[in-house]
Image (cartoon, grey):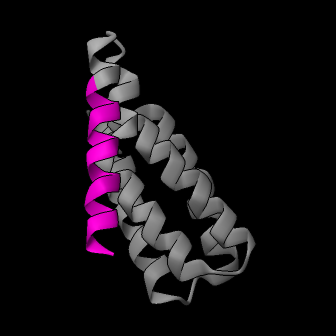
Amino acid sequence: MALLRSGLLSEVVVMAFDTLRSSKMRSALTVLGVSRWSPARAARAHLYLAMAMANRNEPQQAADHGLQAIASSRDFGTLRRAKALDTTLTAGYAAEPDVQEFHERYRQLARQAVTN
């Protein structure tokens, strides 16, 4: 079994280096499992996932993804989407501790954005 795994690993590494040699750096990084996401792009993905979780009645997971999003990016688009998440979460789950934490962190960031 271990021999099979090392054979598979070596095959993946060889594929990655072959891709590198053919000047396709991005594809090689993808083969190795490295993505080139900007912090804003990752934050958007977390916020989309958070909205989906909120719509599935999973406020703890939604708040967690929301916190990850606002921790990684503070651009205008992220704050705008975080506002929508905050509105959704506080409307239906205001008593949840995770939702309250997200709400407070979002409000702090929104205040900082206004004063800057």
In-front residue for pair 62/5: 5
Residue that appears at 33% across and 43% down? 11
Residue that appears at 28% across and 34% down? 14
Q: Main secondary structure of the magenta part?
A: helix
**Residue 8 appears in the picture as rendered:** yes
In-front residue for pair 41/5: 5
* Spot occupied by residue 79 in the image (x, y as percentages of width and height): 46, 44
Q: Quadrant of residue 101?
A: bottom left
Vertical comparison of 92 with 22: above or below: below
Location of the N terminus by quadrant is: bottom left
Q: Quadrant of residue 32?
A: top left
In-front residue for pair 46/25: 25
Vertical comparison of 7 with 116: above or below: below
Residue that appears at 55% across and 70% down? 62
Q: Which residues are magenta?
A: 1-17
Vertical comparison of 83 with 18: above or below: below
Location of the C terminus by quadrant is: top left
**Magenta-span inclusion, residue 3:** yes
**Residue 35 appears in the picture as rendered:** no
In-front residue for pair 74/52: 52
Q: Is residue 95 left or right of residue 35?
A: right
